Image (cartoon, rainbow, N blue to C red):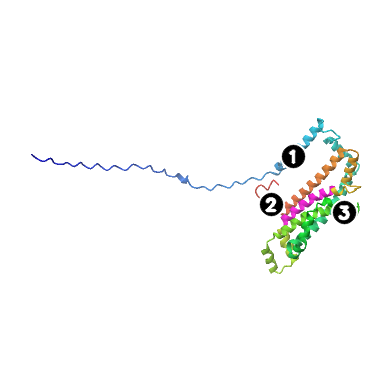
Amino acid sequence: MTAPTATTAAPAPASAPAPTKEAPADPAGANRLVTPRPQVRRPRSRTYSLIIRALGPVVLLALWWTSSATGVLTPDVLASPAQVVDAIAELWGNGQLPDALATSLTRSGTGLVIGLAAGLTLGITTGFTRLGDELLDSSLQTLRTIPFLSLVPLFMVWFGINETAKILLIAVATTFPMYVSASGGVRDTDRKLVEAMRSFGLGRLAIVRQVVLPGALPSLLAGLRLSMTLSVIALIAAEEINATEGIGYLMSQAQSYARTDILAVCILVYGLLGLTADVLVRGLERVLMPWRTAGPGGGGR
């Protein structure tokens, strides 16, 4: 009897590796990181900007006209636009409006020039010199907080009801905006640049004229805009000091006779004076600082 022979099982064939799915080739670098292009906003055309600016006044005028035509606004409350136009023609024809406008512009302009000169001088003094800062700034900051309208009774006591009181009231109102802007602009001037100019032998006046004032120009124009606006506001208050001529005098006479059409004319004149002042400062900005309107979005200013 023969012993059984052990049979060994043949080893199983090695399994082939599973096929791997290769990533598709990137044709022409389609998955590259692409830097986005900067979005440059096209400047608005001047015509489009003017239309947008005129939209608000046109809507207000339409509402005014409609309210007057439907009887919501009666003439004893506010005259209609047609009545206001007739009043302008009447006042211009008899010479009252041109004379009053010339008087008011003279008062406002004279007070504005005095206030700007005082504010600019004081601002440069306190911003450029340590002695001026320590000697004047705290006192001027205290005076700046006093409302200029509170000075009306005091000016009437000091100067009476003549032109001096009116012009000085406008001058006081326009001094402090220019002072704050000039002082801040001068303080922000690069001190290293000032020291460099001193090393070249420039004196203080030359440094102020060639370095400080050009560097403070944006602040100075901001102060000019605010001062010109306040000159119109102060003019309204000044012409209430027993005026015998000017736009304020026309308003007083119209109030006595309940002429709402003439009152509306005077209010519109004051508003146009303020708008004209703002337009003039914007024009100065375009001439003196063209880089502020040359950038993106600046073309529509």
The location of residue 181, given as percent across then percent down, is: 74, 56
Q: What residue would you read off at disc 3? A: 155
Q: Nearer the viewer, residue 5 or 247?
A: 5
The location of residue 127, given as percent across then percent down, is: 73, 61
**Left or right of 17 in this view: 234:** right
Residue at point 45%, 44% (across, down): 27
Mark 1 or 3, nearer chain start: 1
Which of pointers 1 and 3 indicates the residue nearer the eye?
3
The location of residue 30, given as percent across then percent down, is: 47, 44
Alpha-carbon neighbours of circle 3 within 10 Å: few (<14), some, or many (≥20)?
some
Alpha-carbon neighbours of circle 2 within 10 Å: few (<14), some, or many (≥20)?
some
Amino acid type at circle 3 is: Phe
Mark 2 or 3, nearer chain start: 3
Q: Disc 1 versus disc 2: distance between alpha carbons?
A: 25 Å
Mark 1 or 2, nearer chain start: 1
Amino acid type at circle 2 is: Arg
Which of pointers 1 and 2 indicates the residue nearer the eye?
1
Alpha-carbon neighbours of circle 1 within 10 Å: few (<14), some, or many (≥20)?
few
**Disc number at residue 292?**
2
Residue at point 80%, 33% (across, down): 67
Write down the region rendered in magenta.
216-236
Q: Is 10 in the magenta?
A: no
Viewport quadrant of the N terminus:
top left
Q: Nearer the viewer, residue 224 or 4?
A: 4
Name the quadrant containing residue 138. Answer: bottom right
Q: What residue would you read off at disc 1? A: 56
Q: Is 229 in the magenta?
A: yes
Name the quadrant containing residue 128. Answer: bottom right
SS at badge 3: helix
